[in-house]
Amino acid sequence: ATAEIQYRMTFQAKEVDDGYQHIQIALGENIDLSYYPYEGKWESNSDNLSANNGTALYQVTFRHGGNSQNGNWASYYLPNTSGSPQGCSSWSETFNNGGGSSGSSYIALPVDQIYMTVGYAASGKGNDKWTTQNEKYYFRIGDTQEPQLLAVAPMAQTAYSAGEEITISLIFDEIIDKQNSDLSKISISTNLTGPLSYAGGADTNVLYFTGTVTSSFSGGEIQVKTINGNEYIRDICEDHVMDNQETNGTTEITLTGVDKPTVNIGSVTVENGSAAASVSATNADILKYCWTDSAKLNT
C-alpha cells in the first residue's frame, strides 16, 4: 500500500469585527510566511512563487458575515469538498505542495511528518478580529493505492490441447486481503482461453485462476489481456475511496512448450525366435526399451 496521513478539521467561528477570515495548514512548527492575507485573499511575497515551493499545504479565505459584522457562531469544516460557503457568504480554498487538489476531502501529510501548524489570520479595512472555538483535528493513516499487478507467474514449459484445464497465477505487489476483497467477482481473460475464474490465493500476494483452453497451444506467447473486476482486489486497509486502479491491463509471458511425444514402430520382423523393429520418436530426448511377452505395458 501507498500510505499518507490524512487530516481534516472542524471548528466554530464568529466575527468580532467585519472582515475576511484566513486559515493556513503548513508543515513544520511555523506557518509559511511566503504567503500573507491581504484584502480578502492570500498573497505571495514573490510573483514567481509556485504552488509547490514552501511548506503551506492548504489555505482558505472565507467571509463569515458578508458585508457586515456577524457575531453569531457558525460551524465549519475543512477542506470543503463542495466549495459551497457553508455558514458564510464566500469560501475560497487552495492546495499547495502536494497537500491535495480541488475537491479533496482531506489534506495529505507525509507519513514521516512530525509537526504541522494551523495558522489563523484576517484581512479587511478595520480591526478584522474574529474568534474560534471547539476546534477539532482529525488524523488517519490512508491507503492511496490498492494492490497492483507485478507479473504473471512462470508456467511449466508445456503444450496445451483444446479442452485441457489450465491454471494461471498473477503476482501482486502486496497481500490480497480475503475479508476486504470480493474475489468471486474476479476473472481474467487470455488469448488462449475464455474467462478464467478465481481459484485461490487470498491472504497472499498470488492469485490463481483456472479454466479451459479453447485452442491448442504448442509454444509461443500467452497473454493475460484483461483482469475483470480488479476493483474488488483489495489490501488489508479498509479505505478504498482513494484507489485509482486501472480497470484492465495486459501482461505477457513466453512459453517454449512442445507437442506431446509420439512413437513410431516400423519394420517389425520375427525370425528364428528373434524380433527386430525400427523405433523412432518425435518431441522426445531419450528412448528406452523394454522387452516383454505381455500385451500389457510394463511400469
Image (cartoon, rainbow, N blue to C red):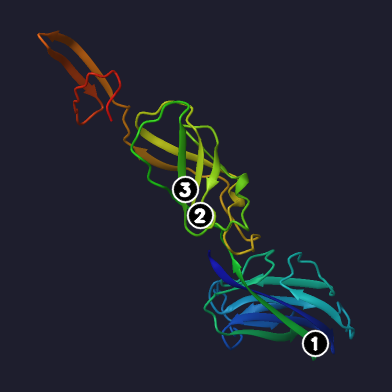
Relative height, residue 274 to residue 153 (above, below): above
Say which residue label 1 marks: 133
Q: Could you say whether the residue bearing mark 3 is in a helix, strand or loop?
A: strand
- Give me the C-alpha separation between circle 3 and circle 1: 53 Å
Q: Position of residue 294 (x, y in %)?
A: 26, 19
Q: Is residue 61 left or right of residue 51?
A: right
- Give me the C-alpha separation between circle 1 and circle 2: 44 Å
Relative height, residue 49 to residue 130 (above, below): above
Relative height, residue 33 to residue 96 (above, below): below
Q: Residue at x 60, y 49 (%)?
A: 183
Say which residue label 3 marks: 170
Query: 10 Å neighbourhood of mark 2: few (<14), some, or many (≥20)?
Result: some
Q: Say which label, 2 or 3, has the lower sequence index.
A: 2
Q: Could you say whether the residue bearing mark 2 is in a helix, strand or loop?
A: loop
Q: Position of residue 242 (x, y in %)?
A: 63, 61
Q: Are marks 3 and 1 in contact (CB under 8 Å)?
A: no
Say which residue label 2 marks: 148
Q: Tell me if I can see residue 161 in this picture.
A: yes
Quadrant of the rendered image containing residue 129: bottom right
Q: Position of residue 15 (x, y in %)?
A: 84, 86
- Give me the C-alpha separation between circle 2 and circle 3: 10 Å
